[in-house]
Amino acid sequence: MVGWKMHEMSLVEALMDTLLEMQRRQGWSKVSRVTLKVGKLRQVVPEVMVFCFEAASKGTPVEGASLEIEEVPLASRCTRCGEEWSDSESLGLCPFCGSADVELIQGMELLLESVEVELDGAEIGRN
């Protein structure tokens, strides 16, 4: 399929660009572990993301690194009454006052939480 790319591969390509730029600037010899925080609304399938990460990292200093994904659940806040709740308690309306003036406060994250690296074969920790 020309022009079609799975969502997770696009995210992994952006992650790889970031990791390789960090590796180039800081002189790491190898990346051993990467941890991401991914909001539930990003609709990432962790197994697919790990598969894409393994494929995209081949032949780079990131090859062989583990990718850990921490899902961040949805959370909302009513701008009228100020109450907060998780996604399982509402269908877009405030469960406390019934207002539709609701804002998403958590669940769209895509954060590089940590990177564990090696320098000349010795692990030097998180970045």
Image (cartoon, rainbow, N blue to C red):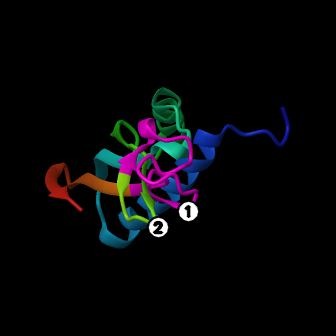
Q: Looking at the picture, how far across and down is residue 25, in whole percent?
A: 37, 72
Q: Which residues are magenta?
A: 85-111
Q: Quadrant of the C terminus?
A: bottom left
Residue at 58%, 40% in the rendered image: 8
Mark 1 → mark 2, Cα distance in angstroms: 6 Å
Task: Residue lying at the far front in this picture: please name it.
Answer: 97
What is the crowding at mark 1: few (fewer than 14 residues within 10 Å), some, or many (at least 20)?
A: few
The correct choice, above or below, for 15 with respect to 91 in the image is below
Q: Looking at the picture, how far across and down is residue 22, in whole percent?
A: 38, 66
Q: Looking at the picture, how far across and down is residue 83, in whole percent?
A: 36, 58
Residue at 32%, 47% in the rendered image: 35
Which residue occupies the foreground of this view, 104 or 55?
104
The answer to whether 112 appears left or right of 90 in the picture is: left
**Image quadrant where residue 120 sits:** bottom left
Q: Looking at the picture, how far across and down is residue 72, in whole percent?
A: 37, 45
Q: Quadrant of the N terminus?
A: top right
Q: Residue under circle 2?
A: 80
Image marks 1 and 2: residues in contact by CB distance under 8 Å: yes
Q: Which of marks 2 and 1 precedes in the sequence?
A: 2
Q: Residue under circle 1?
A: 101
Whether 25 is among the magenta residues is no
- Element under label 2? loop
Which residue occupies the foreground of this view, 74 or 52?
74
Which residue occupies the foreground of this view, 63 or 39?
39
